[in-house]
């Protein structure tokens, strides 16, 4: 079995989470660079319409990709639990079934993306002047589904085993490749928007290959033996049961963003470029949230398998509070430097104005977004992702659509697309608190819901 230094079931809770989260943070940072570099180079070399095309495709890509990433996340929780319990046979079955599921998902994503790209982009009210470029970007991106799906599968296996460093190394390498290919294809060869998608696809494929080599060469129980990759139907059902709610949760968030993007598209290419540029920058600000919540999920799943409830309590409090503080601190810095940062993508005053206006509305509420993601991560680690999914479904999908539709009956303004985010972050945070108070999510979840309320009120865990 792997060395104890990689297990999260012993040692200092804070040190284990931080050491595990830091490589995830850097990995997410470089992964975020994929999209940011695409937009920077596209905006500077191809103009505002091309930047709008990339931005318009981004939310739709996240909606589809997020579903399959959620399935991989659920598989990682299962593998982490088996590792915590030191169940060698189940680890092997789960790993090879996860790889097989990833291959199936890759082909499904390619088919769906190629077939429905134009239809969905038209439903999103994508302006005619950017539609053709959006379709090209979308189709090329999904033609390379194998690379980014399998990278997330392999990364999930490594992180479930407590290894967050090697995925980071591979992402650094592929990010450098991505930048080089972007400059080569667009700046030198002037190949257009599709080249940005092609550069991203190729670089993600490289990172997937490196992860795969690492896993087949490993001597641990989670290693991949290609001849054993197959669909164990009992394990598939287990993976789907754990991963489907997380996948739906990601798609729900993606769908709500697609709906909001459709409202933004009505205001033209400048609004699309400005808000799209801001969203790229905001993605970097949310990296601490993503890092700590991913670390929390693995931490909780391993300690749940090892039957360590006290460590789950301590880890949850530390991880969520840290993510909240970091998110709000970085949000304030974002507000200060938003205009010059947006200007890096497109220095058109109207583009900068749209992006900065969005920033002013959402930054004060970043801490609540962090809180919501943290609680969802704990539930995923405990094998209860459906409960978190229900909060996201109601607050981040249903309520956003209702707010946009109702306000649209009385006033037509882009401000609606700004304030819909903070309103629903407040609702989702309150939903966790009320769920605890009313205990509607199940009688056996006392530890989790006690934690929710204690973290919300800033109290002590000593009485939990």
Image (cartoon, rainbow, N blue to C red):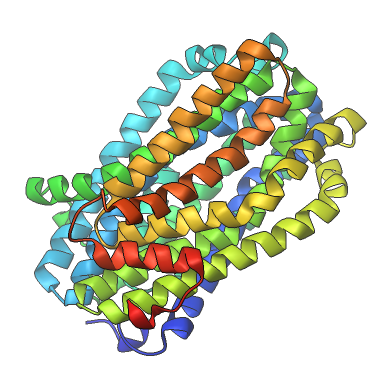
Q: Residue at x 54, y 57 (%)?
A: 370
Q: Quadrant of the N terminus?
A: bottom left
Observer-nearest of 162 and 229:
162
Q: Residue, x 65% and y 29% (percent of image)?
A: 417
Measured as percent of width and height from the top left, residue 305 is found at 20, 72
In which quarter of the view is residue 461 placed?
bottom left
From what the image shows, is residue 170 above or below residue 189?
below
Question: As drawn, which residue projects farthest toward the front?
Answer: 438
Q: Is residue 296 left or right of residue 201?
A: left
Question: Image point 58% across, 63% down: which residue?
Answer: 324
- Give percent across and percent down for residue 383: 24, 58
In the figure, 103 relative to 235: above or below? above
Please say whether residue 462 is visible from this viewpoint.
yes
Q: 95 or 372, which lies in front?
A: 372
- Judged from this view, the residue extending furthest toward the bottom is 11
Q: Position of residue 246 (x, y in %)?
A: 34, 46
């Amino acid at each position: 079995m792997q060395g104890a230094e990689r297990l999260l079931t012993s040692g200092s809770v804070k040190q284990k989470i931080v050491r595990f989260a830091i490589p995830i943070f850097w990995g997410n940072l470089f992964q975020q660079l994929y999209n940011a570099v695409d937009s920077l180079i596209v905006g500077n070399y191809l103009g505002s319409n091309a930047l709008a095309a990339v931005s318009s495709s981004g939310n739709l890509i996240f909606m589809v990709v997020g579903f399959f990433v959620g399935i991989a996340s659920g598989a990682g929780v299962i593998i982490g639990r088996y590792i915590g319990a030191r169940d060698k046979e189940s680890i092997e079955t789960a790993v090879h079934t996860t790889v097989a599921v990833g291959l199936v998902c890759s082909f499904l994503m390619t088919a769906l993306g190629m077939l429905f790209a134009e239809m969905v982009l038209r439903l999103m009210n994508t302006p005619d002047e950017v539609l053709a470029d959006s379709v090209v970007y979308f189709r090329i991106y999904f033609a390379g589904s194998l690379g980014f799906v399998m990278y997330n599968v392999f990364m999930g296996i490594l992180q479930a085993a407590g290894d967050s460093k090697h995925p980071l190394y591979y992402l650094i390498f592929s990010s450098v490749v991505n930048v080089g290919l972007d400059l080569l294809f667009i700046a030198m060869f002037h190949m257009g928007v599709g080249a940005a998608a092609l550069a991203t696809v190729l670089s993600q494929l490289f990172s997937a290959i490196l992860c795969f080599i690492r896993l087949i060469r490993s001597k641990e129980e989670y290693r991949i033996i290609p001849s054993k990759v197959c669909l164990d139907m009992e394990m598939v059902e287990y993976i789907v049961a754990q991963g489907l709610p997380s996948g739906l949760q990601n798609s729900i968030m993606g769908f709500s963003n697609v709906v909001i993007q459709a409202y933004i598209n009505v205001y033209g290419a400048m609004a699309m470029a400005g808000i799209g540029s801001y969203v790229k920058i905001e993605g970097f600000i949310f990296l601490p949230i993503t890092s700590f919540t991913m670390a929390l999920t693995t931490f909780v799943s391993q300690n749940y398998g090892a039957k360590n409830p006290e460590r789950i309590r301590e880890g949850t409090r530390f991880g969520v509070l840290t993510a909240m503080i970091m998110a709000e601190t970085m949000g304030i810095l974002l507000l200060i430097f938003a205009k010059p940062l947006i200007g890096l993508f497109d220095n058109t005053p109207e583009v900068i104005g749209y992006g900065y206006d969005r920033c002013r509305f959402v930054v004060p509420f970043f801490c609540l977004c962090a809180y919501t993601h943290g609680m969802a991560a704990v539930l995923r680690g405990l094998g209860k992702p459906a409960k978190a999914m229900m909060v996201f479904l109601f607050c981040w999908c249903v309520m956003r659509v209702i707010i946009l539709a109702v306000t649209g009956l009385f006033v037509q303004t882009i401000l609606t697309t700004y304030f819909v985010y903070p309103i629903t972050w407040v609702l989702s945070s309150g939903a966790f608190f009320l769920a605890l108070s009313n205990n509607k999510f199940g009688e056996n979840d006392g530890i989790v819901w006690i934690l929710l309320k204690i973290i919300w009120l800033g109290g002590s865990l000593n009485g939990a």
